[in-house]
Image (tube, rainbow, N blue to C red):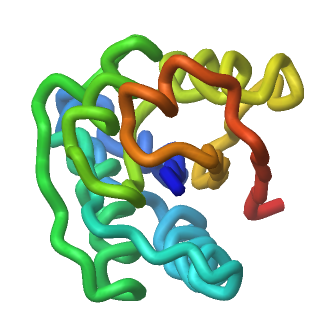
Amino acid sequence: MMRLALVRHAKSDWGDPTLPDHDRPLNDRGRGDAPRMAARLAETGFRPDVILASTAVRARTTAGFFSKEFGTAIELQERLYGAPASVLLEAAAESAVAAVIVVAHDPGMSVLAARLSDGGIAHMPTCAVATFTWDADDWDAATALDPDDWTLDTPR
């Protein structure tokens, strides 16, 4: 069985307009939502082998809350910053593990979630968690098929 959790980074802080986009931190809501959503994902029985995250501060910080909840290492990948859906799925497949969390940005996250859910997920709000499960033994087989199951959980 192959499992993927897509996590859009939590709400970021726009208080300092001089900060480059890559360096924006989480705001208070984001710092509250991320650990709560990580705990809710853990309650489902999802257990990641690895967490892949964009190098942007808001994605790294969000991933840190999931890492703490699961005791799973984070692998930072520059290519996930602003990545299209195809790159997000490619990164998950290249991880070569059975269960992976990808923490990244829109619009790529929403596009991939919509594609994998056959349009059932129209949008991934900040800190949303979408999970996808395939009854397959490897990512080559999984990415060639529609998922057998999917879920969406949002902080609001």
Q: Is residue 75 above or below residue 143?
A: below
Q: Looking at the image, which residue is at 21% across and 44% down?
A: 95
Residue 91 position in % (x across, y down): 26, 31
Whether residue 98 sits left or right of residue 145 in the image: it is left
Q: Looking at the image, which residue is at 78% across and 47% down?
A: 149
Q: Which of 50 and 108 is in front in this view?
A: 50
Residue 18 position in % (x across, y down): 21, 30
Residue 90 position in % (x across, y down): 31, 23
Most distant residue in the front direction: 137
Residue 100 position in % (x across, y down): 38, 55
Most distant residue in the right direction: 120
Q: Nearer the viewer, residue 85 or 64?
A: 85
Whether residue 56 sits left or right of residue 114 in the image: it is left
Which image quarter: residue 119? Answer: top right
Q: Which of 129 and 138 is in front in this view?
A: 138
Q: In this view, does 109 lie above or below 101?
A: above
Q: Looking at the image, which residue is at 69% across and 35% down?
A: 147
Res. 87 in view: yes
- Which quarter shows the C terminus? bottom right
Which image quarter: residue 56? Answer: top left
Q: Which of 27 and 71 is in front in this view?
A: 71
